[in-house]
Image: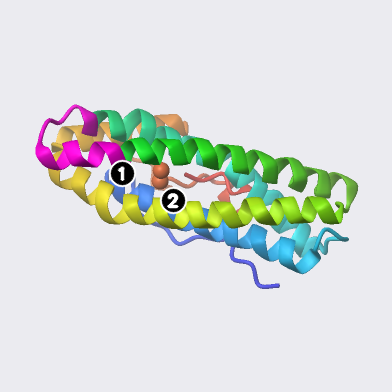
Amino acid sequence: MSIQIGDKPGNGFDNPLGLLSDCHRRIERFLGNLQQVADQAEGGALTDDQRHTLEISLRYFRKAVPRHTQDEEASLFPRMRRIVNDEIKSALNQIQALEADHQRAAELHAVVDKIGSRWLEKGGISAEEVVRMKVALGELEGLYSNHIALEDHEVFPLAGRELPADQIEAIGREMAKRRGLSYEDPLRCRTRREGKDGNAA
Ligand SMILES: [Fe+2]
Ligand SMILES: [Fe+2]
């Protein structure tokens, strides 16, 4: 199995919108890794590689995705809501839909995490659990594909055009603080242990 875990350095906290898009690439990659493990092992015994992939991917979604959601819901979207112009006004409905997606994604991740954790603990899961895990992963794939496209191609570029530089900087500073890192941290949104535990943005 060829599973991609490592990461190229991306944007820094001084480009928070670029950093958020970098994090989308990680979401896509870790989701693909989970689907690969589920398809290949089908609930049975895991190889060392599959076990490692399952562990770090579950941990990524457990730890990093809630921070990414906070970056958007607590740092980015409220600043966009405070800007009054027609373009932002028409984007607000989309932002509301994005927040609903976050909620649904959290529910689906909880299903995957519960089944995946049991798989790691017991060494195997039932056929019914494999189906439930795959269904949840499939729904996540569909949800993220629309959600990420909307954020990467519409919401983030709009924010980049409309938010003043000091507000963009404030978002980056909040993102760094959320991760216990400095704004100037050369490791950017990654942590020293990202390669081991997917504990990234
Ligand atoms: Fe989002
Ligand atoms: Fe996002």
Foreground residue, 97 or 106?
97
Q: At 80% from the left edge and 50% from the top edge, which residue is drawn?
A: 129
- Residue assigned mark 2: 23
Residue 69 is situated, as x and y percent measured from the top left of the image, at 44, 37
User: Where is mark 1, residue-wise?
Assistant: 16
Q: Is residue 83 above or below residue 65?
A: above
Quadrant placement of the N terminus: bottom right
Q: Is residue 86 left or right of residue 39?
A: left
Ligand 2 contact, mark 2 (Cβ < 8 Å): yes
SS label for mark 2? helix
Taking the spot 54% from the left edge, 57% from the top edge, the residue there is 141
Segment colored magenta: 80-94
Disc 1, ligand 2: is the CB inside 8 Å? no
Residue 30 vs residue 73: left or right? right
Q: Are marks 2 and 1 in contact (CB under 8 Å)?
A: no
Front residue of 172 and 87: 87
Residue reaching furthest to the left: 85
- Magenta run includes residue 92: yes
